[in-house]
Image (cartoon, rainbow, N blue to C red):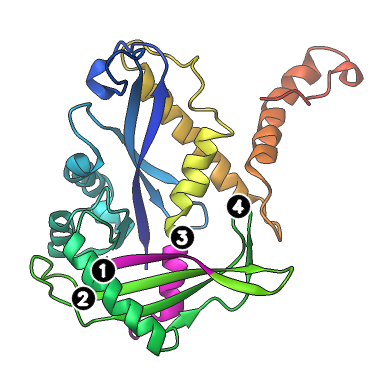
Amino acid sequence: MRGLSIDGKVQSVHDKPLTPYYCQQQNAEGEPERYVYKVLNATLISSSAAVCIHQKPIPAWTNEMGYFEEFFEELRAAYGRAELFDVVMSDAGVLSREHCGKLNALGYGYVVALKSNNPELEREARALLGSVATQQRPVAEDADWECDSSRGWIKRQLWTSTELAGWPGWEHLRQLWLVRVLVLHPEDERVEVLEERLYATNLTTGHRIRGQHVLSMVRAHWRIENELHGTLDIELREDDSGWVRRGYGLMNTGLLRAMAYNMLAIARSVHLRRTTLIGWQQLRDWIRDALLWPRLRDSGPFDQAEPLLAPA
């Protein structure tokens, strides 16, 4: 399955922007003016390098969900004939019930998180799958515990149900998924439930998609946060206040940063064949050094060039 993850990203703007059409004022009355610049990003999560294939700024008068259709039409126009993706994953704040129906009508699979913006379906799904999880073994489970940098030793479990397929207003719905994340405390071997996430989808598990594929797909969805958005925030310092504000400066520098991220992602996942992935910061510094080294070497005696150890 060729998966695409779509999610919104917010960039803080610390002074009054010169492109107010795309910058939403966020301060309360009486507080200093504060703005945010929001974009929708699309990332290929089934490829070796989770490259960003589209970025579009969101006008101040709407949000991720309100701008999804225009964003997705541009994706189809650019990549539809290439059949680059056939499953779209997103959070509840981007994909609505109506959007899921349109994706289904166009022949795409969808996987959307179920949250409070679909209260009735979310309530019924939680009750149903909660009961299933107490009575049945999981359909799939991670083979081993995985060390997560922020959550410790975790393992995922999956339960599925077709009982609510065709829910009123969700006639395209075929299956519900419950993904439970367990956390292990090594000091006393205690295991507890860290979180549970519900998903609605028009996919069906069977010959093509098995339970382990679902767990891999749900995990891959977070590549848009952990790889694209995390790199933009930390290594490329997107929220720093010194970026261009005039004209289309925010849009242009945003696209340039996405292109820089794609270079890093392809180098990290495709060209640097290692048993373990190197960190984004180390990779950034290596590429910076490769670009600067010839200039330093040619500017004077090679052995007198300053070491490239300063932060980028």
Q: Nearer the viewer, mark 1 or mark 4?
A: 4
Q: Residue drawn 46% across and 16% down?
A: 243
Give, as a three-letter code, the residue at label 1: Thr
Q: Quick one: label 3 or label 2, which is nearer the N terminus?
A: 2
Q: Which residues are magenta?
A: 193-219
| Dot 4 and dot 2 residues touching (CB under 8 Å) | no
Question: Foreground residue, 53 or 6?
Answer: 6
Q: Residue drawn 28% across and 58% down?
A: 115
SS under mark 3: helix
Q: Quick one: label 4 or label 3, which is nearer the N terminus?
A: 4
Give, as a three-letter code, the residue at label 3: Ala
Q: Is residue 238 above or below residue 102?
A: above
Give, as a three-letter code, the residue at label 2: Arg
Q: Picture coordinates of residue 196 (x, y %)? A: 41, 66
Q: Marks 4/2: CA distance?
A: 34 Å
| Dot 3 and dot 1 residues touching (CB under 8 Å) | no
Q: Quick one: label 1 or label 4, which is nearer the N terminus?
A: 4
Q: Picture coordinates of residue 287 (x, y %)? A: 66, 34
Q: Is residue 285 above or below residue 47?
A: above
Tally the numbered discs.
4
